Image (cartoon, rainbow, N blue to C red):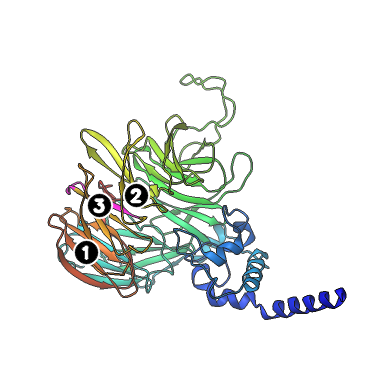
Amino acid sequence: MIRFTVSISAALFAATSLAADPASDYADHCTDCHGPSRLGALGPALIPQTLGRMRGPNLEAVIRDGRAATQMPGFAEVLDTDRIAALADYLRTPLDDVPAWGEAEIAASRTLTPDYAAAEAPVWSSDPMNITLVVETGDHHVSVLDGDTFEVLDRFETPFAVHGGPKFSPDGRYVFIMSRDGWVQKYDLWSLSEVGRVRAGLNSRNIAMSHDGKWLAVANYLPMTLTLLSTEDLSVTRVMEVIGKDGTPSRVSAVYQAPQRKSFILALKDAPEIWEVATDPNAEPVYEGFVHSREKDMVEAIASSEGLFARRRIEVTEPLDDFFFDDDYRNLIGAARDGRRGVVVNLNVGREIAELPLDGMPHLGSGISWDRDGRRVMATPHLKEAKLSVIDTETWERLTTIETEGPGFFLRSHENTPYFWADVFFGPNRDVMHVIDKQSLEIVKTLRPVPGATVAHVEFTRDGRHALVSVWEDDGAVIVYNAATLEEVRRLPMRKPSGKYNVWNKITFSEGTSH
């Protein structure tokens, strides 16, 4: 009887296993976000090298329930327990071949547009400093808007799954756009033409422009590198392997420009370090070993690096994500892995100086700062709680919280407006946009432009007179508001407009916009 029961169970298990087709399930449900080869697209690469570094719930739970505060849905209603388990095992199986992706492979991927010709002046009559780009993820295009008339000057195709904000050259002429599968595209706004593109990684996070506009840094998950490109011709200049002091290879969560410091700042995903990479050819030497004397002109030590791309390690207690920088880039706040606090790191002295209770997973990368009652403050949304935190950037104390109608993703403002705007990206009130007074911290108006549709991400025109809001749907729109009266001015149909980026605001590091 026992043998019979075991035989029946084994037969049922075998039948279930035969019924499960994880490769087919992956193709049906995962390819669009994670790529046909599992090397990443909109979502991260799904291979053992990256899955082994995931924190939090196990893989089966992620497939079943999704991940909170991300675009990863749950598949419990589509896949049964056995198919979920088979799919998880499939994702844990190493690829037969993970392509190498170093300088040679990057260089071989570079293509320049054959008929591109650089115009001597803009081929349009708009204000070059008031051009706004709209990233339309619905069909992988970017629209080029005149910031005064809101007419579309051009609409061009981008690589699949653009991620992170586009970066402009210091003169505002060129823009660089990156996709999650590592492609970097260069586009000439004056000529309204693509210049070329190159694949800088296999699964990438974001890009940053150097202070002088000469170099573009690409933060990669796969391979675990920082790719440095020449902005002039997209040629690869250097590929830096990212390995912690203890020998641990690490993904790069993000790379940021620190213009006053003439450097890039890297957030490491898997090692308790922050890296600073110099963009100044005259950068001082970095000493990582023993230094007998630091007296000027009498240093008794061997530099690990110096000059352009010199690398400095700043050790922290644990890996930090999602950085916010104060105005002079002396301090940063990083989000701790527990999602309940922020850690302040002084970049000058290279150590942690404060800790903030910021429960509810703060989204510090969307933080903004302004002057309030004679003091500099910053605010950040939270991805898991319906509130905003307001922080004094001198004492690093949380001054207050502002209750919202749901967890948000973006904050935006401008130096010429008394308000900042906060979306409610998650939950049933995702169609809400709060407008908040920067001095009283009171919500002065709650907009609901399209009931039931996700409303998110605000950008201002150069002068701050108009605020552009995304209706984040495939048949969405960019809604133009008068930033003073908060009345709707115009509605521009768009295909899931995920973000807007004004040339002037970005190249001048305008107050209230992300960098």
Q: Which residue is mark 1?
A: 122
Tell me, for residue 505, which label it has, or none.
Answer: 3
Q: Amino acid at mark 3?
A: Asn
Q: Which residues are magenta?
A: 409-418
Residue sitting at the far left = 485
Residue under the point 37% across and 34% down: 330
Badge 2 element:
strand
Q: Is residue 278 visible?
A: no
Labels in figure, total:
3
Q: Judge left or right: residue 251 versus residue 447.
A: right
Q: Earlier in the sequence, mark 1 or mark 2?
A: 1
Residue nearer the viewer, 433 or 238: 433
Badge 1 element:
loop
Marks 1/2: CA distance?
A: 44 Å
Residue nearer the viewer, 77 or 72: 77
Marks 1/3: CA distance?
A: 19 Å
Tell me, for residue 261, which label it has, or none.
Answer: none
> Could you tell me what secondary structure mostly forms the magenta stretch?
loop
Q: Quadrant of the N terminus?
A: bottom right
Task: Name the spot of residue 106 as percent of width and height, x first.
Answer: 52, 61
Q: Earlier in the sequence, mark 1 or mark 3?
A: 1
Question: What is the quadrant of residue 326 in the picture?
Answer: top left
Task: Name the spot of residue 441 as percent of width and height, x first.
Answer: 23, 44
Marks 3/2: CA distance?
A: 26 Å
Depicted 167 relative to depicted 331: above or below: below
Residue under the point 74% across and 76% down: 13
Residue 78 colored in magenta in the image: no
Q: Is residue 360 visible?
A: yes
Q: Which residue is mark 2?
A: 387
Residue under the point 33% across and 54% down: 410
